[in-house]
Amino acid sequence: MGEETLQQRIRRLSKLTKSEMKIAELFEREYHTLAFETLQTLSSKAGVGLATMGRFINKLGYRSFPEFIESTKNEVLARLDSPIEQYTAKKNAIPETKDNELALHVEYAIRNLMEMRARIAADDIKRAASLIAESKGTLYVMGAASSQGLAYFFHTLAMYFKDRVVLLDSNPSLLSHRLIDVSGDDVLVAIMHYRFSTQTVLAGRYFSRKGGKLILVSDREFNPLSASAAVQLVARSESPSMFNSRCGTLLILETLIAAVIPLLEQQVYERFAAFENLSEEFGTFAMAASPSKWNGMHSKMEHEKEEDNGH
């Protein structure tokens, strides 16, 4: 347990009470400054009693509050080894340009993206990509409300490397029909933001019960599907406007696509060729794919086929 991070310890807990959820959200929100807090200040900020705070810290596996503080401090210092994480820790120092909406939104986006880069380990991306590439079953994709557009985006591009990709509708009357054939060979990419779609939560839990692998993309570390996820990728969504930003989530999805393609490269070339032929037949696009790009991909595909035949 000594090597587990604070977030991993919390994620390992199967169920949190309302008070524990308040504490978990505080730990996530003020992660970089926890080492400077006292038991009293943390309890006050979370809105819970001293005893409740103490019990939760013990529940996480820390023998005492000083051990919790020391462990958290070492964890934060280890993350500050890289320049990108130093930037994250100092993100509040970025001046806000209140008279320029574009500049203000760009600043918030940079903060979210830098924090996301510090939070997500490269191995988590690799594992998620491997689950998708190595799956023998169907790839399901789901998101509700603003997450639905992101799910549609991921589903569209995933069709280039998988032949069985299903976009789940959050309509309760249709969801059961789409999930009826889920098995342990399948993978679900679920996109979910605070306040968390009930249908996405139910689908994710059902998927997990059937033995399928759940890849969860969210804006909160602690959410109703954390315990069910094989891989969880978190991107904060703070924004200066009344609506939260989704740029971090979009970047995660683009990164996943980029990470899967090398694992299924030959299949991607073949399916891309088929898509191009269909697009030309149906006149899908006003402009055709760049000849140089397509010829390069086609030449590489033919070269690899020749090498395979030679062996």
Image: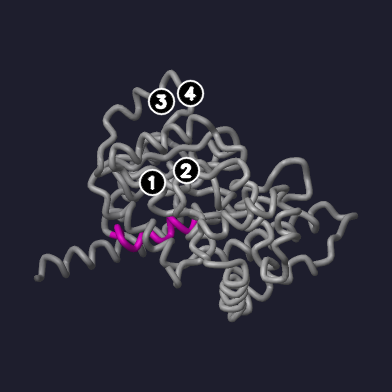
Q: Quadrant of the N terminus?
A: bottom left
Residue in view at x 80 percent, y 69 percent? 93
Q: Nearer the viewer, residue 286 or 75?
A: 75
Residue in view at x 43 percent, y 59 percent? 258
On the image, which quarter does residue 111 sit in? Answer: bottom right
Q: Is residue 292 visible?
A: no
Residue in view at x 39 percent, y 63 percent? 126
Q: How many labels, in total? A: 4
Residue type at tag 3 = Leu
Q: In the rendered view, does 137 fall on the left or right side of 56?
A: left
Q: In the rendered view, does 158 fall on the left or right side of 38?
A: left
Q: In the rendered view, does 90 fall on the left or right side of 204?
A: right
The residue at the far top in this view is 173
Residue labelled with disc 2: 225
Percent position of residue 64, x then y: 57, 67
On the image, which quarter does residue 26 sit in? Answer: bottom right
Residue type at tag 2 = Leu
Q: Nearer the viewer, residue 207 or 252?
A: 207
Tell me the element at label 3. helix
Please tell me whether mark 3 or mark 2 is closer to you in this view: 2
Instruction: Say whether disc 3 or disc 2 marks the residue closer to the N-terminus.
Output: 3
Instruction: Mark 3: give few (<14), some (14-19) or many (20+) Cα within 10 Å.
Output: some
Residue labelled with disc 1: 214
The residues colored magenta run 254-265
Q: CA distance from mark 1 to mark 3?
A: 16 Å
Q: CA distance from mark 1 to mark 4?
A: 20 Å
Instruction: Mark 1: give few (<14), some (14-19) or many (20+) Cα within 10 Å.
Output: many
Q: Are marks 4 and 3 in contact (CB under 8 Å)?
A: yes
Q: CA distance from mark 2 to mark 1?
A: 9 Å
